[in-house]
Amino acid sequence: MAGALGLGLLLALLPVVSASMPGTVVRLNKAALSYVSEIGKGPLQRALQVTVPYFLDRSGEVLQPTRIQILNVHVPQFHLKFIADFGIRLSAAANFTFKIFRVPEPLELTLAVELLADARVAQSSIGTPVISTSYCFPLLGRSSDFDDSNSTSRALLVPVQEHIKAVLSNKLCLSVASLVQELNVHLGTLIGLNPVGPESQIRYTMISAPTITSDYISLDISAVLFLLGKPIVLPRDATRFVLPQHVRTEDTMATVGLSQHLFDSALLLLQKAGALNLDITGQLGSDDNLLNTSMLGLLIPEVARQFPEPMPVVLKVRLGATPVATLHPNNATLRLQPFVEVLAVASNSAFHSLFSLDVVVDLSLQLSVSRAKLQGTTSVLGDIRLKVASSNVGVIDTDQVHALTGSVFEEPLLKHLNALLGIGIALPSVVNLHYVTPEVSVYEGYVVISSGLFYLH
Ligand SMILES: *[C@@H]1O[C@H](CO)[C@@H](O)[C@H](O)[C@H]1NC(C)=O
Ligand SMILES: *[C@@H]1O[C@H](CO)[C@@H](O)[C@H](O)[C@H]1NC(C)=O
Ligand SMILES: *[C@@H]1O[C@H](CO)[C@@H](O)[C@H](O)[C@H]1NC(C)=O
Ligand SMILES: *[C@@H]1O[C@H](CO)[C@@H](O)[C@H](O)[C@H]1NC(C)=O
């Protein structure tokens, strides 16, 4: 009893936990479904190519086995449509060509088959979409070619045709069911882990049953982000992300809504993984580090006193606070608040901390999609703000340091960030499915990707 109660409590708690995970919504419309039927035609044709057992002619005195082979299955028509609150209806017309190894010479026979099947789309226990055929009916034999046959062959062909029909009515729906199983395995790759950075990964799972109307199917998908194999969770109220009404979903096959929470979580992950940190180093006399102690010594006398000989200077940029992404109507911005330590490298390679700065950088964030990844590029918005946090070299004139560090700091930081954000974060997808001609729109508090889909065979 106590155990059952405990389990009940746990089950009651589970949806709350998952609802607080960063949400995305993936909506697929009729155009996506017709793309599925287009690329599914080949696999359907292959699946329908069943084996037909020998026909045993029991009419004569000797049992006469006749070999029957399907030469070809042609599917001229394959349609899929949504059934509201249920799933998908499949209708297909197939044209079978058989070879009957009749004595004395073989004969070809064609048979038209119409196939109807209804499939429920649901959520599996592991958070993948799962399709199951609930109804399947093959309508057999609208036409058959007996044109060449005389009465003798007709005597054979009528029972052969019956034999074929019996076999097909048994096997075709099984073939459809196993094709659907293969599709389920493929859809299962939705929950595959995708790398975000060196030690971080993202995994998407479905968190509720899909919403199905006659125009689309909408999946609530949540991301779990992992750092060193452990999920990281942002404290947040358990409001589910919903794709707002005004977002148009008819124009492209797929519409993917990404919540602010997903951006917050991804940034938290990058920060916790240390991926945003960088060291700006340089050699004396090189062009890529303008800073050295003799240069700083001109502004800060104490630096000149401590380092009479020019020494290289290193900037250690550390992000202690999580960057904040803000999604405005039509634009996205990113605020970084790095802590920058400025160190001199002594001749024995020891680091001497000179001073440290609290920096605020506002960046504009441009989002784009490549294959199945969301990428970003940034550029600095306005002025980099900085404040001296600590100093081992006496009083520092912030304005002078600003002019100097700003230019030293800005370019490597942008380069680093853009390289990192350019790797991109995996979007909900399945293996081999890419987004094509995607458009990214930023709204207040969420981002929408409208995209075509392309499956790499
Ligand atoms: C089926 O095949 C036959 C013979 O090749 C052809 O005459 C017929 O038009 C085909 N039917 C369909 C629906 O493709
Ligand atoms: C009828 O078919 C049988 C068996 O295929 C063949 O032996 C016979 O010659 C055919 N008769 C005619 C008139 O085509
Ligand atoms: C120190 O930095 C200044 C300014 O970038 C540069 O002109 C000078 O050559 C540097 N000194 C050495 C020794 O690298
Ligand atoms: C972004 O949008 C907000 C709100 O519309 C606006 O206040 C801000 O200036 C915009 N920023 C940029 C960089 O376009």
Image (spheres, rainbow, N blue to C red):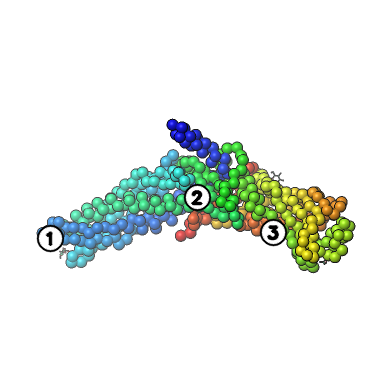
User: Which badge, 2 or 1, comes first in the chain's sequence?
Assistant: 1
Q: Residue at position x 15%, y 56% from top? A: 58
Q: Earlier in the sequence, mark 2 or mark 3?
A: 2
Q: CA distance from mark 1 to mark 3?
A: 84 Å
Disc number for residue 415 = 3
Three-letter code for the amino acid on which mark 2 is drawn? Ile
In space, the residues marked 2 and 1 are separated at their CA atoms by 58 Å
Asked if 328 appears above or below 301 in the picture, the reply is above
If the picture is divided into quarters, which one holds ligand 2? bottom left
| Residue ID at (65%, 45%) | 327
Q: Amino acid at mark 1?
A: Val
Tag nearer the camera, 2 or 3: 2
Position of the N terminus, as image quadrant, is top left
Q: Residue drawn at (50%, 36%), measured in percent from left and top?
A: 10
Q: CA distance from mark 2 to mark 3?
A: 32 Å
Residue 352 in view, yes or no: yes
Relative to the observer, which residue lies in front, 273 or 214?
273
Instruction: Tell me the number on the disc at residue 268.
Output: none
Q: Three-letter amino acid code at disc 3?
A: Lys
Which badge, 1 or 3, comes first in the chain's sequence? 1
SS at circle 1: loop
Name the residue nearer the viewer: 26 or 90: 26
Q: Is residue 331 above or below residue 57?
A: above
Residue 191's disc is 2
Count neighbours of disc 1 (C-alpha within 10 A) and say few if under 14, some if 14 to 19, many if 20 or more: few
Identify the residue position indicated by label 1 in the image. 62
- Which residue is most to the bottom? 285
Mark 1 vs mark 3: in front? 3
How far across and down, in percent of the image, does residue 226 sit? 57, 50
